[in-house]
Structure formats: C-alpha cells, structure tokens
Amino acid sequence: MIGLDRLMKIKGVVAAGQFSDDGKVIRKVGELPEDLMKSARLCVQQNESSREFLKALDDRSERDWQPLMGWIVWGGKYSVVVIGNTRVFVETSRGDYNQLMIDLAGSEGTGPRPMNY
C-alpha cells in the first residue's frame, strides 16, 4: 500500500484518509468537507457488513470469499474506495480505478505489457 499523498496524485482522487478499527480518523488529505472526512465510522460499519456478506457467500458456495480486502461504492458524483482501513474519495466519472486497485491492494496491472526487445 502506498501513502496518502501519492494516492492524491491518481486521476480523479479528491481526498484520502486512514481510520482506526473503532472509526477514529488517523490521517486525512484532500479537499472534501470536514464532515465527510469524519465519516470513518460509516466505513467501519460497512466493513462489518461486508464481512458478514462474505461469510454468507462462503457458507453458500464452494469458493473462498474471505477475508475482506475492501469495497467500492459508486455514487453519481463521488465514489468511495476502501481497502483495509484506507479510504479514497474519487470523482466517479474521472477516477482511475485500475491504478487505485494496483496501489491500494498491491496487485499487478493487467493487460498488455511493454515488449523488451
């Protein structure tokens, strides 16, 4: 996972923050209003709901769904991407979600790779 300041350089990102397991804001950067930046408790509640959902999927299927890595809520103007205890607010239509997933989840990019001749 990369730092919040670097996340802010990704296309469409307007704010980012980290929160504790009890919903306290640890660090925040960006241009969203203070009341929205303090919505960390909502993220904790969604983490809990998503864990329950994944457990239910585990119980009903033969696939491994756990542990919860993160979630995304797409809104009309803004979206929120949460991986672990890091949240990123993105302008929905402008966001580079591929880069966010690479940087937040530590996954490798997919698609064509440059050829080394």
Image (cartoon, grey):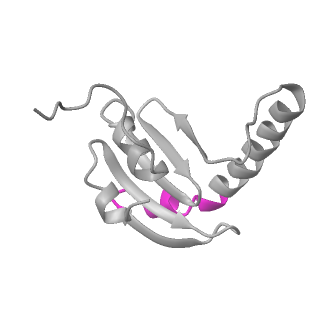
Specify the quadrant that holds the C terminus.
top left
Percent position (x, y) of residue 11?
26, 42
Determine the image quadrant of residue 6.
bottom left
Q: Which residues are magenta?
A: 30-41
Residue in front for this viewpoint, 2 or 4: 2
Name the residue at 69% across, 50% down.
47
Compared across the picture, whether 7 is left or right of 56 comes to left
Name the residue at 59% across, 56% down.
84
Specify the quadrant that holds the N terminus.
bottom left
Residue 10's place in the image compared with 57, above or below, is below
**Which residue sits furthest left?**
117
Name the residue at 33% across, 48% down.
13
Percent position (x, y) of residue 42?
65, 54
Residue 85's place in the image compared with 117, above or below, is below
Task: Check if residue 34 falls in the magenta segment.
Answer: yes
Residue in front for this viewpoint, 117 or 74: 117
Compared across the picture, whether 23 is left or right of 58 comes to left
**Which residue sits furthest front?**
117
Percent position (x, y) of residue 73?
55, 37
Name the residue at 77% across, 29% down.
63
Task: Check if residue 1 falls in the magenta segment.
Answer: no
Compared across the picture, whether 117 is left or right of 7 comes to left
Residue 55's place in the image compared with 34, above or below, is above
